[in-house]
Amino acid sequence: MHRLWPALYHGVQRQYRFFPVCQQITCLMSSKPGDPTKPSDPLTKNETENGEDTVSATSVPPSRPNAISSLPQLEDWVFRLLSNQQGRVPVSEFHKALREVGLWENDPRLRETMANLRKLQESHSSFLDRETFSKCITENIVLIGRAFQSKFVIPKFSEFSSYIDKMYWSCVSQKNGKVADYIPQLARFSPDLWGVALCTVDGQRHSIGDSDKPFCLQSCVKPLVYATAVSELGDKTVHKYVGTEPSGRSFNEIALNKYNQPFNPMINSGAILLCSLIKPEDHQSDRFDHILKVLKAAAGDDFVGFSNTTFLSEKATSYRNFALAYYLKENQCFPPKTDLMEALDLYLQHCSVDITCESGAIIAATLANGGVCPLTGELVFHPDAVQHTLSLMHSCGMYDYSGQFAFQVGLPAKSGVSGGIMLVVPSVMGIMCWSPPLDSTGNSVRGLHFCKELVSTFNFHHYDNLKYKSKKLDPRRHRDESRSQQIIDILFAAYNGDVTALRRCVMLGMDMEVTDYDGRTALHLAAAEGHVQVVRFLLEKCGVRHDLQDRWGQVPLDDAVRFGHKETEEILRKAQEQSG
Ligand SMILES: NC(=O)CC[C@H](N)C(=O)O
């Protein structure tokens, strides 16, 4: 699994690799979001065999998700949550429900489930009964269970995604900036291209716009090469050669710090130098292959390519980078025996690696997740290396705008000349923005605007105070969501006819019979509004009582009658008859 790793970090590998199975399951059922010491995790039932399929039970009434004490019970609970009136789960509904919690069909952690569903669909079956459903999902039930119990870092994921979409659209009108034109491969990009993708530390994904179009990483590769170097060599060795201070000058300035080092690894001289440190004894092709493998692992095997035309154009126009490399050589910055041209070539090859916003978001999420790829559980970068990388992205990642970015956005980020901005919300998510027009500091105009919008809506700025909350929203999972907030969520969802939101409340183990100060339940509100689907959901899925009285002695049926909702009235009458 950790094939990329030298013996140096063996201890850490073991910690991830051999985390005891029973502990893994308990932690999956109860871990805090984003805890970097815990796998975040692609566990499938395969790994849980040996009879270790029980999870910690708590003393809450049955039918609540946290009372589930075995994986079969969990399967049963998920089935009941998703099944229709005929007691079957439509395959399309299952896919939709997965999307709503942020799980994509190509998620490697759902490989077995998706293969089973494909087989079924080949036999033209689009509905799953209890037994078939269980057979299909059993190998991935731990992940699916966590997803549907809202145990991911962003529990209201579809709500969060719609905020992201709004921000995305608000950036479309930003028409300023100029597309880089020093090489034809960049000059050809339309200024209208604009994509955003995100991936959380639990592997929840969302994307919008041109998020599946390839573009070259350019300077966004720098933090990744640095993280690789520190993971493999340790920070002491790396920082014998390169500093940690913002340069206060342009990214390709010919200058060194007072110790005769490049100022930091986020500028060209630092990045060229790093290329001389990683696997210097290997053949040039293997050295490039090595970085490509690391990037691919960080992207959970999503798209990572290479544009040879970009590389050739870069090389043909890289006068400044040649000058920088010779300057480094002249000042004896490289380790002895460094082949300057090899280091330079490697640097330009790294810049020419292609990604998409979608794969870039997974890479950024690996950084957000302490170096463990959320989709594969693979330890790609050492956690200490990730910490150093994020620190340097925070202080030096946005060219000459780094100080202002740290002030306004307060998050580690790295931008590149192709228009990409890789943004990390530590322990929460990675985001990749891409739009080619650049401002005068070399940062993507739309990408920058998006980052600012993000932190003005959500309390993601590093110095946002989480205790004395501002007006900003906090989309992260909090175990102790207040009871009054729960009541508001349930009653609003019922009033608005929002079955999806109600399903989320069930997933969170909320009491679906809560009342407001007038003793009104979700069923009262849904009946009064004539929301047939909600009334059915509450009665059939949640088993709420149909005859709870509000403070005026009214039951939901009275509301349905009073407001003339015939179908709702019928459903409630039937419930009354059935209860005798
Ligand atoms: N600023 C960047 O994104 C790097 C641009 C270009 N490849 C260079 O090295 O000059």
Image (cartoon, helix red, strand yellow):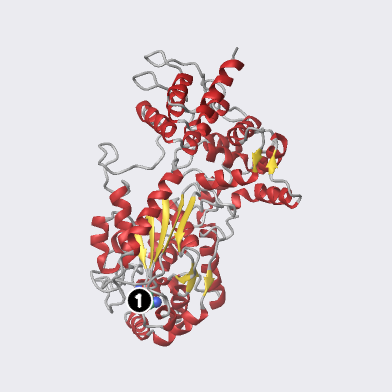
Q: Quadrant of residue 328?
A: bottom left
Where 349 falls versus 451 (above or below)? below
Front position in the image: 305 or 367: 305
Where 353 falls versus 149 (above or below)? below
Front position in the image: 204 or 276: 204
Label 1 packing within 10 angstroms: few (<14), some (14-19), many (20+)? many
Where 408 falls versus 251 (above or below)? above
Residue at 42% x, 16% y is 554
Residue 156: where, in percent of width, then height? Answer: 44, 41
Q: How many marks?
A: 1
Circle 1 — which element?
loop
Regarding residue 406, the answer to whether it shows in the image is: yes
In this picture, residue 481 sits left or right of residue 406: right
Residue at 51% x, 68% y is 291
Residue 277: where, in percent of width, then height? Answer: 44, 71
Ligand 1 - quadrant of the structure image: bottom left
Q: Name the residue type under label 1.
A: Val
Residue 350: where, in percent of width, then height? Answer: 46, 73
Front position in the image: 26 or 230: 26
Q: Quadrant of the C terminus?
A: top right
- Ligand 1 within 8 Å of disc 1? The answer is no
Q: Which residue is mark 1?
A: 179
Residue 250: where, in percent of width, then height? Answer: 27, 74
In this picture, residue 143 sits left or right of residue 350: right
Regarding residue 382, the answer to whether it shows in the image is: no
